[in-house]
Amino acid sequence: MSAEQAITEYRPLLYAVAYRILGVASDAEDMVQETFLKIMRVDLSKIEDIKNYLIRTITNTCLNHLEALKRKKEHLVDNWSNITNNFHFDPIENWSNDKATELSEGLKNMMKKLNDAELGVYLLKEAFNLNYNEITEIAKKKADHCRQLFHRSKLKLEEGKDKFNVDPEKHFQLFKKFQQANKDGEVGSLVDFIFGNKKSESIKKGKKYR
């Protein structure tokens, strides 16, 4: 059985298992997506009982998720809220601030590893605490696609492999717009820069985030 066939056949079962453990529909869907991303890198032809293997995998994924929530460990790569919640965003000119330098380097590091869509969804979810419905609305992408982009970005950051060259001007503009978005809570300019979209109606009306 291929990974694609396993995904089609066992998605309802794995969602039920995840929901039973987590009790939150969106989290359960996230864990299903994360499990499928994992098995895409596994040779299922060598696994005797694929169904039980998938159940064990998603169970462990859910338990790890709960443990991570319990520990509430925050790190620049794994959780941007550690920086965005504690960082005082001074004017752009004050780049001598250690926190600003840390944030700038963090963005640069992510740009080396993620494409624009992955970077955009990751920042909207982790730095601005947007849910998938909000991300779908402003990024003009389907919720399932946003979930895939988010989990793909997490895997790439964990792997730590550089895949892209970073243009200094693009890096500067990204940091400038990211800093401004954190100061006023409006992500319109940042979204337009990353995704190349026209502003959604919610952004035009001044809807604020964070």
Image: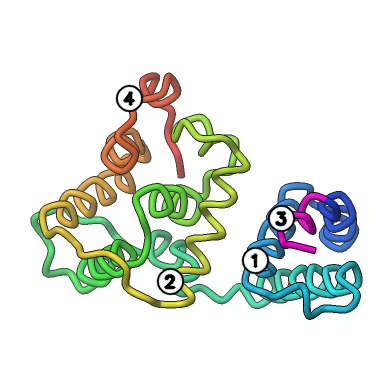
Q: CA distance from mark 2 to mark 1?
A: 23 Å
Check disc 2 and give the amino acid type.
Answer: Val
* Label 4 vs label 2, nearer the camera: 4
Q: Residue at x 72, y 62 (%)?
A: 3
Quarter in which the N terminus is drawn: bottom right
Disc 4: which residue? 198
Q: CA distance from mark 4 to mark 2?
A: 29 Å
Disc 3: which residue? 4
Q: Residue at x 34, y 65 (%)?
A: 110
Up-down relation of residue 91 to residue 66 (above or below): above
Q: CB under 8 Å between callouts 3 and 1? A: no
Check disc 1 and give the amino acid type.
Answer: Met
Marks 4 and 1, the one that precedes in the sequence: 1
Over which residues does the magenta segment extend? 1-8
Disc 1: which residue? 40
What is the quadrant of residue 80 in the picture?
A: bottom left
Q: CA distance from mark 3 to mark 1?
A: 8 Å
